[in-house]
Image (spheres, rainbow, N blue to C red):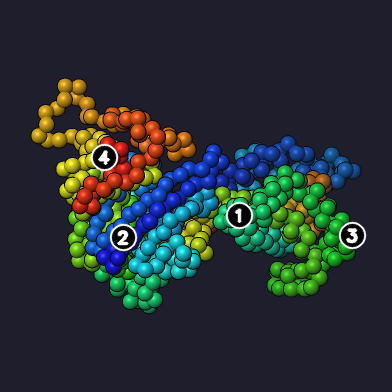
């Protein structure tokens, strides 16, 4: 068990180092940071001075080692635009994105699980068939389209929910939350549903598929032959077995929700990390873009590690060594 | 009537598929006496397992449905019972073990819990009491170190051990009838003998009747008192085990018995065992008359007209064949 965990952690670190290398190489070709920092009207001397300050006159490997060394210490440089540390800037936006993604994930998993299980147990019901058609439709429609449609219906036509923004937030330490105010919750509904819809559709279909497979297993018949009710067999014997493969997918989904909330955040003007990223790309604010990529990579790696360990706990057949 | 644990009368189970109606059971009559082992023999697809699942009412539905018939268990007709009452019977008064011990246990549940689940469900015992009884039951089916083994997952046990767990689970509530669907088929020969011995011993000890489903006449000879031979959804011969082996009356039964290699006979020139020609008919396109007609070496004109009725040969030996009309 211990060797398994340490092995997985080592792998994760290697992945993160890989991401830094790709980041570093990519940004060699994305405009001159000295120019971005010093401004369009800077003189040649000022430009050279800025380049020296940023260490751009040093050999490439030295620049990389310095970049890595600073990154390990949480220093990703200063935003060209706001002149504040890039990491601070990104982390300040993180609560908004995490609350959005978290709500979307809970919604997607709970509803997706319920609908998926129902559709597997009662495949001939009209509701089950409708769910299958509906989820397939959602998978084929792009998120921005769903977002715009939902704004049109629920915010403009019906006027039930606010069309954009995050509403009132309350600060708890470094975390600013919108979950504790009525306005914050109201603002959260549309973006969270829009963001979670795709994952909901995937979860429904995956859980249904897994459940149908498990329900055809011999041990389900054994459980029925014991005298257990269909409900008990479904919950106690089938669901847990069907959830094992789903955990892997759910882990990937959390990562995707956080990383790909960019579209939803843009449509709803949600002040999260994705919104910041788009802005920073537009302004060629390289430190912020790099920081965003690194933070997302870290979250992805962390979630995958958690998933692998959960997998072991759920499935006794996996040996730890 | 009180001599019987179960009496199956004129049971019809059909499957309504897209290709048509599969008549898996076309009027089965079977009686099992108290304390008796009835062997149900036949090729794959002849309806043995459907008979078992019909008794348990675990036919996958749809597409399957019990169309007609009666299953008398004691004085109750099981087919008239609702699902809640049937649940009370399953695993309690009638229990079942299956062919594949590898896949018949839940892979992510400790085996002790799987056995205890039955006990708690039907006897309403506390967790601790059910645990004690589980360990006692595991010891009874010959699992060494049952206290520790109860904590194992199925993948940590061998096939034979898992089948013992299945037997422990099935017998944990002292059922009146145990349905064993090919209980030893998936095991290798020495383990097979152990499992069959165990079943025989527990049957004597607990007074359980057994419906033993198998395609292996050797297993029948060792276990059963009475034998029913099935073919294409019908029982074609029914006899005491001694009668059946000494004087098989149906050409199909004779074919089955002839296809067993015998020690005392010389190996035939061709080095081939005598086999029954052809295969089981497609249940969607059953021939007119006797279903076995196309494969029978002794078929006559009469065979093409009607399905033969069960004919009594005396001392409880019946056969469904025009040769005995």
Disc 2: CA contacts within 10 A as few (<14), some (14-19) or many (>=20): many
SS at mark 4 in the image:
helix
* Residue B90 disc label: none
Tag 1, which chain? A
Q: Would you call the spot at circle 1 few (<14 residues within 10 Å), some (14-19), or many (20 or more)?
A: many
Q: Residue at x 79, y 67 (%)?
A: A186
Residue A181, given in percent of the width and then of the height, sits at 77, 73
Q: Helix, strand, or loop for circle 1?
A: helix
Judging depth in this view, the residue of B297 and B43 nearest the camera is B297
Label 3: which secondary element = helix
Residue tagged 4: B324
Residue corresponding to mark 2: B178
- Whether the residues at callouts 4 and 2 have beta carbons within 8 Å, the answer is no
Report the front residue among B215 and A233. Answer: B215
Q: CA distance from mark 4 to mark 2?
A: 34 Å
Foreground disc of the pair 4, 3: 4
Q: Is residue B197 left or right of residue B215?
A: left
1 and 4 marks on the same chain: no
Using a 10 Å C-alpha cutoff, classify the residue at mark 4 as few (fewer than 14 neighbours), some (14 to 19) or many (20 or more): some
- Which of A300 and B51 lies nearest the eye of the viewer? B51
Observer-side mark, 4 or 2, equals 4
Q: CA distance from mark 1 to mark 4?
A: 54 Å
Earlier sequence position, callout 1 versus callout 3: 1
Q: Secondary structure at mark 2?
A: strand
Which residue is the site of mark 3?
Answer: A156
Question: Going 46% across and 54% down the picture, which residue do you hit?
Answer: B68
- Mark 2 belongs to chain: B
Which is nearer the eye, B319 or A203? B319
Foreground tag (1 vs 4): 4
Viewer-nearest of labels 1 and 3?
1
The residue located at (38%, 56%) in the rendering is B9
> Of label 4 and label 2, which has the lower sequence position?
2
């Amino acid at each position: 068990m211990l060797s398994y965990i340490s092995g997985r952690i080592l792998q994760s670190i290697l992945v993160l180092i890989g991401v830094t290398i790709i980041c570093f190489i990519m940004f060699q070709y994305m405009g001159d940071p000295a120019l971005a920092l010093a401004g369009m009207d800077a003189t040649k001397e000022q430009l050279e001075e800025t380049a020296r300050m940023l260490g751009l006159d040093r050999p490439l490997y030295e620049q990389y080692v310095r970049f890595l060394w600073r990154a390990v210490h949480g220093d990703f440089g200063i935003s060209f635009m706001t002149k504040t540390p890039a990491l601070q800037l990104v982390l300040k936006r993180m609560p908004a994105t995490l609350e959005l993604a978290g709500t979307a994930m809970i919604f997607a998993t709970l509803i997706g699980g319920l609908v998926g299980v129902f559709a597997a147990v009662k495949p001939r019901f009209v509701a089950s068939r409708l769910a299958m058609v509906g989820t397939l439709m959602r998978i084929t429609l792009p998120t921005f389209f769903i977002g715009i449609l939902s704004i049109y219906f629920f915010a403009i036509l019906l006027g039930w929910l606010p069309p954009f923004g995050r509403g009132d937030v309350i600060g708890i330490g470094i975390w600013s939350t919108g979950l504790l105010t009525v306005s914050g919750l109201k603002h959260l509904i549309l973006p969270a549903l829009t963001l979670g819809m795709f994952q909901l559709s995937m979860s429904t279909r995956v859980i249904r598929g897994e459940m149908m497979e498990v329900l055809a297993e011999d041990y389900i018949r054994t459980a029925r032959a014991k005298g257990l009710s269909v409900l008990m067999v479904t919950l106690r014997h089938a669901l847990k077995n069907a959830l094992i493969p789903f955990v892997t997918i759910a882990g990937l989904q959390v990562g995707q929700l956080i990383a790909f909330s960019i579209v939803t955040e843009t449509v709803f003007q949600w002040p999260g990390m994705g919104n910041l990223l788009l802005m920073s790309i537009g302004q060629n604010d390289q430190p912020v873009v790099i920081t965003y990529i690194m933070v997302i990579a870290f979250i992805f790696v962390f979630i995958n590690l958690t998933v692998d360990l959960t997998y072991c706990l759920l499935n006794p057949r996996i040996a730890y060594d | 009537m009180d001599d019987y644990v179960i009496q199956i009368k004129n049971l019809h189970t059909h499957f309504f598929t897209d290709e048509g109606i599969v008549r898996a059971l076309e009027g089965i009559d079977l009686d099992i006496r108290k304390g008796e082992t009835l062997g149900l023999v036949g090729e794959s697809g002849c309806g043995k397992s459907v008979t078992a699942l019909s008794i348990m009412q675990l036919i996958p539905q749809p597409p399957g449905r019990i169309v007609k018939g009666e299953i008398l268990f004691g004085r109750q007709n099981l087919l008239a019972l609702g699902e809640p009452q049937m649940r009370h019977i399953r695993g309690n008064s009638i229990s079942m073990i299956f062919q594949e011990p590898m896949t018949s246990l839940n892979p992510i549940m400790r085996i002790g819990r799987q056995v205890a689940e039955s006990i708690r469900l039907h006897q309403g015992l506390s967790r601790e009491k059910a645990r004690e009884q589980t360990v006692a039951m595991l010891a009874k089916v010959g699992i060494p170190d049952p206290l520790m083994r109860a904590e194992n997952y199925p993948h940590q046990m061998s096939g034979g051990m898992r089948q013992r767990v299945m037997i422990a689970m099935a017998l944990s509530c002292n059922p009146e009838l145990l349905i064993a669907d090919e209980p030893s088929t998936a095991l290798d020969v020495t383990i097979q003998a152990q499992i069959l011995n165990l079943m025989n011993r527990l049957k004597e000890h607990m007074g359980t009747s057994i419906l033993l489903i198998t395609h292996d006449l050797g297993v029948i000879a060792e276990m059963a008192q009475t034998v029913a031979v099935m073919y294409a959804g019908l029982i074609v011969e029914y006899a005491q085990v001694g009668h059946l082996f000494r004087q098989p009356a149906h050409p199909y039964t004779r074919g089955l018995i002839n296809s067993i290699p015998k020690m005392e006979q010389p190996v035939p020139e061709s080095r081939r065992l005598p086999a029954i020609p052809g295969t089981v008919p497609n249940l969607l396109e059953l021939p007119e008359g006797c279903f076995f007609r196309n494969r029978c070496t002794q078929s006559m004109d009469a065979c093409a007209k009607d399905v033969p009725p069960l004919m009594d040969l005396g001392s409880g030996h019946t056969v469904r064949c025009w040769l005995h009309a």
